[in-house]
Image (spheres, helix red, strand yellow):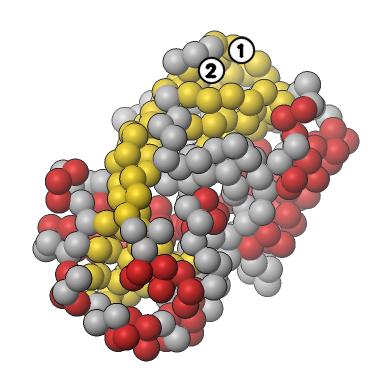
Amino acid sequence: MPPHKINLIVNPNANLGRAWRASADLRPIVEEFGGADWAGTVYPTHAIELARSAAEQGYELVIAAGGDGTIHEVVNGLMRVPAEKRPKLGIVPLGSGNDFSYAIGMDKRPAFALRQVFAGNPKLIDVGLLQDDHGRKEYFANGVGVGFDATVTIRSRHYTMLQGFSAYMAAVLQTIALDHEAPSMHIQTDQEIWDEATMMLVMCNGPREGGGFLVAPEAKPDDGVFHYASVRQVSRLVMMRLLPEVVRGTHGRFSQVRMGTFKELNMKSDRPIYVHTDGEIFVGFGMDVRQLSVQVIPGALEVVV
């Protein structure tokens, strides 16, 4: 593939700024495979613009070097151009969680993952589309979390001395202690309908989030369906009991947990909800969003694995 047709988008601030140093080690590998055009992000959402611009300029491969947030932005940029113009996507894990990189089977070592991208083959993956009751839309690669795990995501940003699974775990414990509300939700998928006081609802394209929590162990990003895991209102003690089960992916055996698959899901809450998409805050504290719709777009992107 000609060098001018490869665009490598690096987020130097990924993994609390450690990604910049790690990306410098990738340059010899890039040159070994013929070179690429480099672009660095300098502000939030910049990777969306860079990826969209790369697609419009005719790049054949866009490599996202960063964490799940970087991949999230690059996917949103690529999905904003017609399918026939979308470049292939490559992923180099430079973040702290790297959950979607794990989902598609990339090596956790950045240099080895980059070699996978240059030497690998494209594979079609599904992408999700999320919309709220204010008409805001966003694409996602790995998953959407509503309620408890969105609050955890927001709180994890405050643990700047920790990274990855450790930061997420600390935020989980804090959220169990301080936030224990379960809004009443009406949830309808293409297969089922239920009403329940729901502490957490996670919709997954990949099996893992938070750098090590196997929320949907059976989820695969190329099977045309999303998996969900829903936890109804339970005590703090039960939440603590469920915690190691979610790490192992064995929480589905508990009666308080509902799991299944869907192609389209709509939910409505009796109070404002918090939402993350791929670990990025979509609905934060102080916002009034009560309805969401999520749908699968099968085979939307080619990812080199």
Residue placed under numbered mark 2 in the picture: 187
Circle 2: residue type: Ile
- Expressed as whole percent of the image width and height from the top left, the position of residue 237 reads 88, 36
State which quadrant residue 109 falls in: bottom right
Looking at the image, is 29 positioned above or below residue 287? below
| Label 1 secondary element | strand
Question: Which residue is at the far bottom?
Answer: 28
* Earlier sequence position, callout 2 versus callout 1: 2
Circle 1: residue type: Asp
| 119 to the left or right of 278 | left
Q: Which residue is drawn at the image coordinates 84% and 41% (left, top)?
A: 240
State which quadrant residue 89 falls in: bottom left
- Rounded to the nearest angstrom, the CA distance separating label 2 from label 1 is 6 Å
Question: Which residue is at the far right?
Answer: 237
Residue placed under numbered mark 1 in the picture: 195
- Expressed as whole percent of the image width and height from the top left, the position of residue 304 reads 35, 58
| 162 to the left or right of 103 | right
Looking at the image, is 20 positioned above or below residue 303? below
Could you tell me if residue 276 is visible in this image?
A: no
| Label 2 secondary element | strand
Q: How many marks?
A: 2
Q: Which residue is drawn at the image coordinates 40% and 53% (left, top)?
A: 72
Mark 2, Cα crowd under 10 Å, few <14 / some 14-19 / many 20+, is: many
The quadrant of the picture occupied by the C terminus is bottom left
Residue 259 tag number: none
Mark 1, Cα crowd under 10 Å, few <14 / some 14-19 / many 20+, is: few
- Expressed as whole percent of the image width and height from the top left, the position of residue 180 reads 74, 34
Q: Please say if the residues under marks 2 and 1 sit with CB atoms less than 8 Å apart.
A: yes
